Amino acid sequence: MVFSRLFFIYIFLPICLLLYALARNVKQKNWVLIIFSLLFYAWGEPVYVFLMIITAVINYGAGRMIGRYQGKAGDTIATYFAVIYDFLMLGIFKYSGFIIENINALLSSDIPVPDIKLPIGISFYTFQTVSYIIDCHWEKVAPQKSFKNFLLYLTLFPQLVAGPIVRYSTIEKEIEDRTTSITDVSYGLNRVALGLSKKVLIANQLSVIADNFLGNVESATVFGAWFGAIAYAMQIYFDFSGYSDIAIGLGRIFGFHFDENFNHPFICKDITEFWQRWHISLSTFFRDYLLYVPIFGKRRKYGGLFLVWLCTGIWHGASWNFILWGVYYGIFVFLEMIIGKKNMKKIPIVIRQIYNKIVIIVGFAIFYFEDLGKLGGFFKTAFGFGGHGLIGIQDKISFMNNIYLVILAVVCCFPLIEWAKKLTDKTFFTKSVASLVTTVCSAFLLLLTSVMLVDATTNPFLYFRF
Amino acid sequence: MSDMNKNNDTPEKSEYVGRYEKRPDNPVSADSSPRPLKPLKPLKKAGTSSSAQPEKPRTPKPSEDAPKRKPARPDGQAPRKADASNGRKKKKTAAEKEAARQRALKKKQEKRERRHNKITRGIAWVNVAAVGGLLAFGSVYMLFFKHETISQDENRYLATFPEFSAESYFKGEYTEGIADYYDDTVPNRDMFKKFITQRITPLKGRKFGDDQVELHGIAFEKKDPQTTTAAVTTTKGTGTAVETTAAETTTTLPAAVEPAVDGEMANNILIANNRGIMIYGGAWGNEKEYADYVNEYKEALPKVNVYSLVAPTACSFYTPENYKDLFESEKKDLDSIKRSLKNVTAVDAYTPLLAHKNEDIYSRTDHHWQPLGAYYAAEAFAEAAGVDFDPIDKYQKVTLYGFVGTLYGYTQSSALLDNPEKFIYYKPKNTLKVTRYDSYFQNPVEEDLFLDPKTLDTSSYYMVFGSDEKITHVNNPSCKNGKTLVVFKDSYGNALLPVLANSFENIYMCDIRYFDINAVDFAKEVKCTDMLFAMCTYSAVGPNRDQIYNNLHY
């Protein structure tokens, strides 16, 4: 199920909230959450829900074993077993088709390509189990003794299908002991409304522009190619960060404090900073678990870097363009590392901004085109070799038809809420007024979003693909 | 919803207020922007850097404060104690005064804080009541208000509640079906959709230029329309509902928008001066394929007179000058078809239509021509075929009002919705015997030539000529010229039937997309003397042309 549909917002969620509120203690509340999380997942994946439960059983068992044999052989065996199992499942269900296709292409063999549907959210929950197992192994967290609690951690529906990748350590204590204050609920509801409107009012609308221009990029003008790519970059941002907002908001309503996943990535000054602001839970995962694995010997700094970006690319999808996309970012991060932070700061900000925006926009174009031939077409068009001129009348019409939408999207890339908060937090009075204004805004956005959703029979989140 | 936090006013609550305030949700804070590439010891860092551990609140719990203060006041002992100490340390009065002042200040501060907390909580309650109330109301609205079953605007049946079966459950269809049902049948759906079209979507931007141009889709697909034409449903995602049952039962509600536009529509529509115009992207060689297929019919039926009438669409006549570059020329492709036809007569509909372009020969809100346009095209064909043709005043003119057709369905543009048009058609006054068969030429049913317009929604007046899935036979008892015409057509052809009915003794009207027998055998069976291919450019050069070929090879 996706969040941005009326059925979720007005039927699934209210029933869940009501039962959650009626539950008397944390134990009962946890049961409500587990049942609704499994229901949520099974709604779209009535078969793969069992795969997820098996994964939970295996990782839970491995965790227990790690706890029992701390530092001994059993610990290591359990760790390896669980991690290999997790990645094997991810490999089979996400990458087997891609791998076999490439083997076939390479060896001109004829192995039948398996037709496996990607289980929703497997990329996200696999990373959660892996982080849990490794944290247990490193004794950073105590293995969870109750299977029920572990299942809750893994399946918690706000973050189940599209992140953020919540670490076990983040909510370890809250699983067993948490309360929700009215301010939490209020904050959570507002955050959900914000996330929904980002997705429905901005991302969905931008997607039309992106598909129109990028979908036919070979016959587009230079302006058209860039316009499409910019719309797509913003679409993904509002789509994915909107989803994270909803996840964080729902989590807060249930008393969980997830970490932020996005921090206004488009205001970054360089590419390294972009990745400190974009999909934070993924980049910290790679930083913590992959960057310094000692498999590259002395060159591990660069080797690790390469590995991180390769994996970032692969994680996003079983297709070459994603791998290219990861490596592409790796190259820029590497270049910035070579230049050095201090030297980077010496470069005039205007140049740095132009540089990073171009890199980011082209990056999203790479992300868009799973067909590398079409990606080539994009580059040809975007850099003036498409032969369709700089700008055409269709670009002008389309731009004018969407001008307010585009302006709104660009403005919303800035940390407006934070700025407003800074201004109003000065006195208690202004803060209170701001809260009331927030209430009005949230209610208005939720209403508007709901009306818009009447129009959208199908409306899936983009990040479901990963 | 408001039951949610019954025990919120218990003392522990302020602990969470404290935590809440200490962990500002300002994502700009250093905590939440970890640096993925900074050389750190990741293992220890991860837990702490992400501010994962719920920290103990600094502010004291009210529950702890209360007992401390209480014993000081009620019994009279406390003041006495204070007196005693006063006697001993008189010198320290200044310091004590200061301490007392501090205590008072602290007390005052605490009091203020408590008041502030109270207000903050109050506002939070208001917020929860507002947003949560909206959720609760929406929930009641979705669950208990009467669900829609038909969308008048879209002219289709909405999703129905799925029936349970183990198979559909494990395919995920059952659960998705339930969700789709609720999403698709929102009470007052059409009202909401209208509101979106008229009030929300226009906020996206401005119309362009003097002609008030809007562009839906793209305009620069100058390539094989095989890849560019598409039915409405593939782009709008409204096809989840049950159009098929609508098509099968053919009761009052004819088969939705879908069959009528199958392969006839472009994704790319320009709206100028409140008229929707499909952007023609050119045939790029496909027009020759069309001609070849039609030539095959002639080869198979050498004694039959074969005609090809490819109708241009509105873009050839109504595109404002400034935007002509966005279109390929239909005329060019029509000429190319004419050159490629062998022993087949190309009927030129373009010239007469151009001559009458100031009349309402094309719909503004629909991708079809108006029946008047079809009349002029039919006239051109009758002339080419050398048959009689009735002047228009011999027909009964019927006017339907408030027509907002397929182009609105696709673009959802308020420029079209707010400017409905008339739909005028012409009824032969003499009696005709009309029989409709299924696509296998079986199961004949006698019917009227026209559907009753009262059963039609304002979006589908063009359906007055009947649906596409049937083979229609019109026998004219008053016409004894011995000619039998077989028409292979798309929905453009439907409008030709009434105005050709007095020119042929028998007409068999077959849609190329819904024809399941061998076309040549069929023509021989009905003793065809004349054969007309009548369709718009999109069908002739788009994917529908393959059907012409397929129908030869059953």
Image: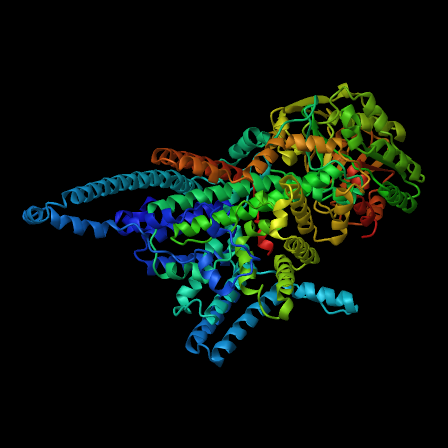
Question: Which residue occupies the foreground of this view, B33 or B541?
Answer: B33
Outermost residue to the front: B91
Depth order, front residue of B401/B518 = B401
Vertical arrangement, residue A114 with respect to residue B49, above or below: below
| Image coords of residue B423 (percent x, y) | 67, 25
Residue B36 location, x and y as percent? Answer: 56, 57
Q: How is the image coloured?
A: rainbow
Left or right: A356, with B146 as reference point: right
From the top left corner, tell me how far across and down residue A140 is, in percent. 44, 67
Q: Nearer the viewer, residue B161 or B416?
A: B416
Quadrant for the C terminus of chain A in the image: bottom right
Left or right: residue B25 versus residue A453 is left
Q: Nearer the viewer, residue B290 or A384?
A: A384
User: Which residue sits at x=64%, y=52%?
Assistant: A336
Is residue B148 rendered to the left or right of residue A212? left
Q: Report the number of numbered marks.
A: 0
The answer to whether any part of residue A362 appears in the image is: yes
Q: Which residue is rendered at x = 78% and y = 24% of the image?
A: B321
Q: Residue B418 location, x and y as percent?
A: 60, 25
Evaluate whether residue A458 shows in this view. Answer: no
Considering every residue shown, the one lying at the far bottom of the view is A73
| A456 sits to left or right of A16 | right
Q: Residue at x 65, y 31 (%)?
A: A401
